[in-house]
Structures are given as C-alpha cells and as structure tokens.
Image: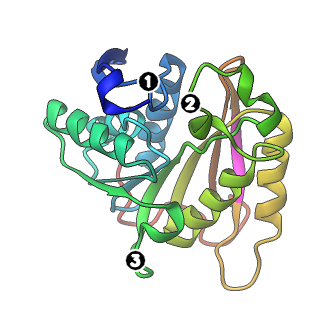
Amino acid sequence: MTAVDVETEIAAFGDLNVQWDRRIMRPRPWTTAQSHWAAALSASCPDGPLLELCCGAGQIGLLAAIMTGRPLIQVDRDPVAAAYVRRNAAATGMTSDVRAASMADALADDERVALVILDPPWVPSAEVADEDHPPSTVDGGIDGTALLVLGLGVALRHLMPGGHVVAQLGTPQQVDVVRALLEGRTGKHPRWVVREVRDYRPGGMLVDIGPDPAADGAQPPSGARR
C-alpha cells in the first residue's frame, strides 16, 4: 500500500481516539490492559521516562503516559507508524519523543528509563498469513521471539534499578523463553525476573519483568512514585 490508496481511520482505545491506517497494525482494545498495568507498576518505579518499543500508532504508551504523567519516549522502525504517533500525541496534548529507528539504535548508550512497554511482533512466521495485519507488524520470526529477544535486551540495558518492563507476547512457550533469558543474565546486571503473567488470549499475553523480590535491594528506591 502507498499513501495514495490508504485512508486514515479512527479507533477507540480507552479514552483515546487513535488515528491509524492499514499500512500499520490496527489498535486492539485488549491491549489497554498493558497501558493500565504499566500505569499501576509506575508507582513502584524510580522517577524517569516511560519507554515504548515497537509502538505502532503509539496508543499503548500514550494511554500509560497520560495516567502516570511520565515523560514518554516511543520507538518504531516504521516511519509511517512514527508519523501516526506524532499525530496521536498531538491530538491528546501529550509530548512524545518519537524515534523512527530500530530498537538497537534508538537510544544513546547512557540513556536510562524507569519503565518500559515492549510490544514486539510475536506471531511465528508460518502463521503470519492467518493474521489480519500487515506482515511486517506481526512477524516475529521462526518461533515468534526474534524481536522479543532483541527488545528485551534493549529494555534491560537501559532500565534503571527498580524499574519494570511490561511485555506483550503470544504463548506460554514465549513466556518460558523470557524466563530462560533472564536466568542467563549474570555478572554486573541487576537480577530481573518474571514477576507475573496475565493471560488475555485469544488476544495475547502480558508479563511483568522486574526486580527479583528475593534479591537484596529489590525494594522500591526512595525516589519511587507513590
């Protein structure tokens, strides 16, 4: 599709009216749960920005930012999606630092964030034809975890101690991949664990990744929002 054969549509997303077109992923109402969960976890995170990776039209991060009042950074590799994020942010009166870039290149080495919303494509490549979305917005590789793995690495590299990641994925097997990745992180990195899983299938699944409650210093820092 090109700009001349698509029409901007409006989708209700919580209290937002989200602009999008069929070159990007259609906003899905069930994912308001990701915004609300991130907003609830914000109370135990340190002060700092909210980062959304693979943001699409931006609605999940925008709704969470409205609820938390945090500065917002949104990243998507698709310039069409990034343009819609800017339009949707302007329509809500929000300021969003929108970056049309790959996840690996979007943040400076020394940038740190307090909370991450991660929305990677998670459909296995063999199942993409069954989806009513542009293939590039849902194709997560052979087992659906290619961009999940990349995004989680980026998120944890830039996450402040005491922060959280709310990630979207599709199956319990993908949750197991996340757990295995976290168990493999050692050395100077903080100890992150899957703290909770919420099942919204047939829509998808959400996981909260945060500090290990059993580890020393896992309590919210003194600057945490209450």
Q: Nearer the viewer, residue 111 or 55?
A: 55
Residue for badge 1: 22
| Span shown in magenta | 193-197
Q: Residues within 10 Å of mark 2 (few under 14, many from 20)?
A: some
Give the label on residue 134, or none: 2
The amino acid type of the residue labelled 1 equals Arg
Secondary structure mostly seen in the magenta stretch: strand
Q: Is residue 174 above or below residue 217?
A: above
Circle 2: element type: loop
Q: Is residue 45 visible?
A: no
Residue 196 part of the magenta-drawn span: yes
Indicate left or right for 132 with 65 as reference.
Answer: right
Label 3 neighbourhood size at 10 Å, few (<14), some (14-19), many (20+)?
few
The answer, for residue 82, to whether it is visible in the render is yes
Q: Are marks 2 and 1 in contact (CB under 8 Å)?
A: yes
- For residue 93, what is the image quadrant? top left
User: Which residue is label 3 attached to?
Assistant: 108
